Amino acid sequence: MMRYADVIVPLPLHDSYTYSIPSALESSVRKGCRVLVPFGKSKSYVGIVHTVHTKEPQGYEVKAIKECLDTFPVVTEAQFRFWQWIAQYYACPLGDVMNAALPARLKADKPAKPSSKKNSVATDLDTHIYKESTGCGFHALNKPQQQAFDAIRQSFITKNVTLLHGITSSGKTEIYIHLIRQALSEGKQVLYLLPEIALTTQITERLRSVFGDQMGVFHSKFSDAVRVAVYRKQLSDEPYQLVLGVRSSVFLPFRQLGLVIVDEEHEVSYKQQDPAPRYHARNAAIMLAHQCGAKTLLGTATPSLESFQLAHTGRYGYVSLTTRYLDCQLPKIEVVDIKRLKFQKQMKGIFSPVLIESIGNALTHGEQVILFLNRRGYANFLMCQTCGWVPRCPHCDVSLTYHKKTNRLVCHYCGQAYMLPPSCPSCGEPRLSDVGIGTEKVEQQIHRHFPEATTVRMDIDTAHTRAAYEQIITDFSHHQYDILIGTQMVTKGLDFDNVSVVGILDADTMLHLPDFRSAERTYHVLAQVAGRAGRRNHRGLVVLQTRSADSDIIAHVVHNDYESMFRTQMEERRQFHYPPFYRLINIYLRHNDYSRTEQLAHELGDLLRQTFGDRVLGPDRPAVARVRSMYVRKLMLKIEKQASANKVRSLLFDIQARLLQQPSAHGVQIYYDVDPM
């Protein structure tokens, strides 16, 4: 009897494809194995066998599998369940999930080497295989930490998810280490998630000193060979017991997962934006733990409103840690009204007098300074003072950012760089003025005020590789620089002993964005960056420069009053049907023709309203309505929390199929962002 295999291919296709299994391959083709299959007229892809059966497909000619690339499955039954959940919840094709889940080399048409019992993984530095150390790096918990540790363990008896709400520098990492040791002693595996590759630099050293070669590190900045080696080791008989990684680590195979730690759980970086699947790693990790019968710990100084609400209502366990390690005080936050100072002509360029004085005092005492501005480059844009012309990206609806170091105009959406025009192409004016500030300009002005100080920038331009980022962190930790100037990278859990002053140069960057999360995000960022000051020997100072000195959010940050911020924001969200009371799904439509994009977006809106009624908003133009020469329109769907995700997904795909049947829809792209950030 002929046997067939349903195969998932790494393409944005919602269904698997059925192939016949040649008799020569019948003994080797199994669920979870990679196979080489023909697709279309002349292409071949490496796919994953999802099901093996004897039911012959009807209505089309079945092609045969060309080759089986594995002697053992590379995707486990548990991973398939997780893939299915990702595809269903985030309304994306299973092929896109496969693409995200497997390292590139596992999607190449190369046969896999058999896995030995003692899987041989390359031993170069990138593999992060560590020799077992003797207890070094493992410290006893102080009283508040011990109480939190005990409370978490007690919470896990009745709750699958617990939120650890610990203020900055309270020693949450040490609690994590004790929980990991407990899980490992019980024969369980642990997944420790961080929101960005950047954060693995410091935490790796701490975990390495305790767990040695029990730990593996996994993220996208490693070479593909290293990621494949880690993936294969997890399939072997001797997998890593502890994996430290970023969001893609949720796709690794685990045999005995017992604990998932999601550090800095509030971070937007946990949300995958492009390409699909647009999953949130925190939520995906909670589901992964649930499917594996494991517990999840969410840790942060500034919880997301969704997580805090679930803890507030008893769905999650809740443990607070309100004492800083070694009884360090929270920093003093001084709010500076730069709108008033500019009116009084007291601002010294970018810096207020109090910030200049504070930096000077810190440098005099041999202390370090962090300056935070969430904009890279030198200036927001250039402008002709005569006619108002502004250089814009020809492919995207945005102005070009001026980068002085490279003397280029750069689009921060498509990445294209352009030479500066010798004069205004509109009126011939020979000089263009720079408007706004970026980290490059901050560095330049710091040198004017403090020419003897050593400075370093940390943004995507200076820290675009793992090695570059780690070098900056190491050098600043060893006081090779006096002043660190950075974007949001500097807010994310970094620990510097000698920083006494933090300057927040424009606290209003996110506060006035047209986004229902803007207030929450502003609180998160300001509270986190403020927590970098005075983390050891004495109380630090935060100089918070703002044009909105009377804002409630600024007051909440100054008083470290998370709960007031939470109550205010929750009332607004309840009133206007936003998360956590409703689920949001953003529906995007892209096409390279402007008029067709407009037409199809309105037709899609009409079709959606026939099913979902006034739950549909739009279509409208997103903040950037053309990216890489593709016009973009957005619709928003607000769905009640109790609605079935599978039913909503099915309805959306049916509506999409009806639209795509129209001849005018040729070339249009439709995709979904579930739980957008």
Image (cartoon, helix red, strand yellow):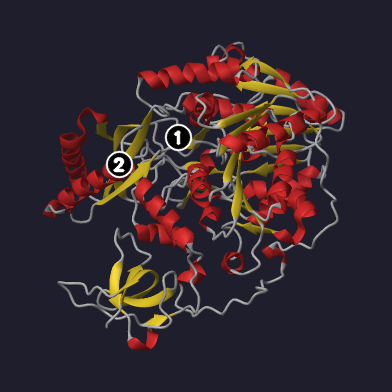
Q: Position of residue 155 (x, y in %)?
A: 62, 33
Side of 249 where 2 appears, left or right: left
Task: Identify the residue at horizontal 46%, vertical 28% (top origin).
Answer: 517
Looking at the image, tell me whether mark 1 or mark 2 is earlier in sequence order.
1
Residue in front for this viewpoint, 310 or 264: 310
Q: Dot 2: within a 10 Å radius of its alpha carbon, few (fewer than 14), some, or many (20 or more) residues?
A: many
Q: Position of residue 470 (x, y in %)?
A: 70, 51
Q: Which mark is residue 587?
A: 2
Residue 394 shows up from this direction: no
- Taking the view exactly as shown, the residue that stands out farthest to the front is 157
Side of 85 where 350 appears, left or right: right
Q: Which mark is residue 585?
A: none
Q: Position of residue 535 (x, y in %)?
A: 78, 31
Residue pointed to by mark 1: 383
Residue in front for this viewpoint, 289 or 207: 289
Task: Identify the residue at horizontal 52%, vertical 27% (top origin).
Answer: 314
Q: Are marks 1 and 2 in contact (CB under 8 Å)?
A: no
* Disc 1, SS: strand
Task: Identify the residue at horizontal 78%, vertical 47% (top origin).
Answer: 475
